[in-house]
Structures are given as C-alpha cells and as structure tokens.
Image: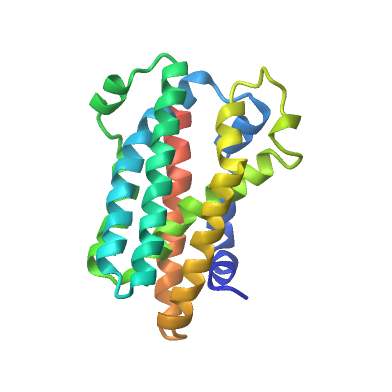
Amino acid sequence: MSLFERLKASAADDWNAYVDHAFVRGLGDGSLPGAAFRNYLVQDYLFLIQFARAHALAAYKSRTLADMQAARGGLGAILDEMGLHLRVCERWGLSAGEVEATEEQQATVAYTRFVLDIGMSGDLLDLQVALIPCTLGYAEIGRRLAPDGVDAIPAGHPYRDWIAEYSGEAFQQAGVAAHAWLDDLGRRYASDNRYPELVAIFRKASRLEADFWEQGLEAA
C-alpha cells in the first residue's frame, strides 16, 4: 500500500469529513448557496497564495534536482489554479483587485499557517504530507463530482466550471505526480517510528480542509 493510501486509511474519519463535506455535496448537485461559493472563491485565492509559498519552500527543502523539479511542478500547478480562480471570480462579479484586497478569514489563516509552520520546522516529507490533502483531496472530489465526465453535467449547472477544472486531465495529472512524489519521499525518508507523526500531520490538514469548507457555508 502506498504511503498516501496508508495515511488515508489511518485518518479515514477526518478524510471523509473533508471530501464528503456538505459544501462538496452542494457543489455537486448545484444546491450550494451562491454566497457560500463567492466567499469560498475569494478565500481560496488567498489560500493559494500561501500554498504557492509552501511549494516554493518545498524547493528550498529539496536535496536533489529531481525533488526540486517536482516542487516546481507543484508550484506551477498552484499558479495555474490561481488564474482559474480569478477568471471564475470575474464571472461571479468579483474583480482581481477586490479579491486581493480581502482579508484572510480565520480558517484560511489556520490552515495555511499550519502548513507553512510544518514546512519551516520539519523536512520535505513533513511538508508534503501537510500539502497532499489539498491536491489529492481536490482530485478525488473532482472525480466524484464528474464520474461520467464534465460533458454529462448540464450546461446550466452553476458550478460546472469549477468541477471541470478539478475533474479535468491537467489537475488529475498534477495529482498523479504529487501522489508519486509523496510515495517516493516516503520510501526514502519514512520509517515505522516516524509514521505516527506523519498521520498526525495528515489528519490535522484534513480537518483544516473540512473547516475551510465550513467557513464558506457559514458565510451564507
């Protein structure tokens, strides 16, 4: 079993609370209030700024060229995702200036600073375990919400563009690359003695993801 699958199994309750949150179900069936999605869009953009910093930190923490290249790939995927967010925000009447001028809310700060703190205090494996719920959780959610492909989602679905992004080939391939890199790091740096600490990081990051969804719902 891969390191990621072991972590998921060890933190199953927290993982499922994240990927099967009411916010996610609302995205899937289109019932999510627009106010919740607008709040999420803005906060997720601010969130991604900090996650871009974390991926840059991963490059600094890398000791091999291959790891630096993997970190660069993760950073590139985040920057592409930020572009999508601004385009979706514009369709919801939110300008880039408005988004960037908004203050980070509590759940945004809690999650992003947790990841950055893990990155600063730990090694590359610790940081990747803190980052991976975001990448692979969104990839799993994308597959769940578009099991038959995005073309099967009605054109009038309010969140079709969002689902298309995370179920699409580009993001899914970014998830495959992140999964492979984590497992490679695990083979090199993980140990049985270290595993409980990695589970604790993974579990906390998954809970913070669920809190981030909840923050959006509370805004509605």
Residue at 39 percent of width and 36 percent of height: 82
80 vs 169, left or right, is left
Q: Quadrant of residue 158 in the image? A: top right
Residue 37 in view here: yes
Q: Position of residue 153 (x, y in %)?
A: 72, 28
Above or below, 138 relative to 185? above
Q: Quadrant of residue 218 in the image? A: top left
Residue at 47 percent of width and 38 percent of height: 213
Above or below, 64 relative to 155? below
Q: Position of residue 121 (x, y in %)?
A: 23, 68
55 vs 180, left or right, is left
Residue at 40 percent of width and 81 percent of height: 189
Residue 114 in view here: no
Above or below, 17 relative to 11? above
Residue extending furthest toward the top: 93
Q: Position of residue 132 (x, y in %)?
A: 46, 58
176 vs 150, left or right, is left
Q: Quadrant of residue 167 in the image? A: top right
Residue at 48 percent of width and 45 percent of height: 210
Above or below, 200 relative to 162? below
